[in-house]
Image (spheres, rainbow, N blue to C red):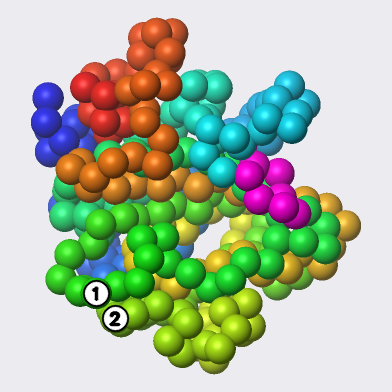
Amino acid sequence: MNIHDALVTLGVTDQTLSIDERNQLLTNGYLHLHGILTQEQVDEVNARLHALLQEEGEEAGKEVHQEAGTDRLANLINKGTMFHVLLSHPRVLAAIALVLEGDLKLSSLNARAALPGMGLQALHADYGARTSTIRNEVCNSLWMLDDFTPYNGATRIVPGSHLKLGSPSSELADTQQRHPDEVLALGKAGDVVVFNAHTWHGGTLNTTDKPRRAMHGYFTRRSNNQQLDQARYLLTSTREQLSEAERVVLGVE
C-alpha cells in the first residue's frame, strides 16, 4: 500500500477540509482544528503520560530530546494505543497532506509539558533557516491536552512566516522576545493546531501553578530521515495493533 492509498483508506478526501480551511493553512501557515479529541480521550492520554513520567523518571524523553523546564516524553507510538489516533484522524492527516503534498510519514510523536514558571522558547522553525519556499519538508501538529490560555505557555506563531526566507534571527535581535506579528494558539483541550513547521513558532512562559500539557506529532516527507527511527523502535506488539494504512503513515510498511 502506498501513502496515497493509505490516506484514502483512513478517510482523507479532497473534501475533508473546507476551501476556507485549506486557504488558512496555505496562507497563514497554520490551521486550528476544534474538538479532535473527546474529553474522555484527553483524560486517557493525560493519565498515560503521567504514568510514563513516573516510570521513566530522569530517562523521560531521551529517545529524542530533553528540555529544562519541561516534562518531555518520546516514542509515544509504542507506549499506548491511545496515541495511535495521531496516525489515523482524517482531518489532521488531510491538513498535513496539504502542506506536504501527500508525501508524508510520521517523524516523531512526543509530549511536552511546560512547567510552572518555565517553558519559554526562542522563536524558531523546525527545519532551520529557509533558503527556498518552493517545497515544504516538515509539518507539525500540536495536540492540546490542557486548555491553552494567554497565561500557561501557549504556543506563539508568526502567521505567514513559512513564506519567508531566513530565520527569526533575521528580524529579532533576541528570538525569545515577542515578534510584532505573533499570535497565540489559544484553544480547548482536545483541539489540534496543524502548522507548516517552517512557520516561526515557540512556547511562551507558563505563569500559572500547573503544567501545560501537549503532544507534538511531527511529520516529514517520505524521503527524509525521521526524528525518531520508527522502524528501529517499533515493537512487535505495536505493529500488530496498527492497521496497514497506519503503518504506512508511520513509515514502517
Left or right of 170 in this view: 173: right
Picture mark count:
2
Residue denoted by label 1 = 131
Residue 217, picture quadrant: top left
Three-letter code for the amino acid on which mark 1 is drawn: Thr
Where are the magenta residues, as a range? 66-73
Q: Position of residue 41 (x, y in %)?
A: 59, 34
What is the crowding at mark 2: few (fewer than 14 residues within 10 Å), some, or many (at least 20)?
A: some
Whether residue 208 is visible here, answered yes or no, is: yes
Q: Position of residue 147 (x, y in %)?
A: 68, 56
Q: Relative to 139, does residue 135 appear above or below in the rendering?
A: below
What is the crowding at mark 1: few (fewer than 14 residues within 10 Å), some, or many (at least 20)?
A: few
Residue denoted by label 2 = 165
Q: Residue at x 70, y 72 (%)?
A: 150
Q: Relative to 126, does residue 64 appear above or below in the rendering?
A: above
Q: Residue at x 47, y 82 (%)?
A: 169
> Does the CB distance between marks 2 and 1 fall below 8 Å?
yes
Whether residue 104 is visible here, answered yes or no, is: no
Label 1's element?
loop
Q: Residue at x 37, y 21 (%)?
A: 232
Three-letter code for the amino acid on which mark 2 is drawn: Leu
Residue 56, picture quadrant: top right
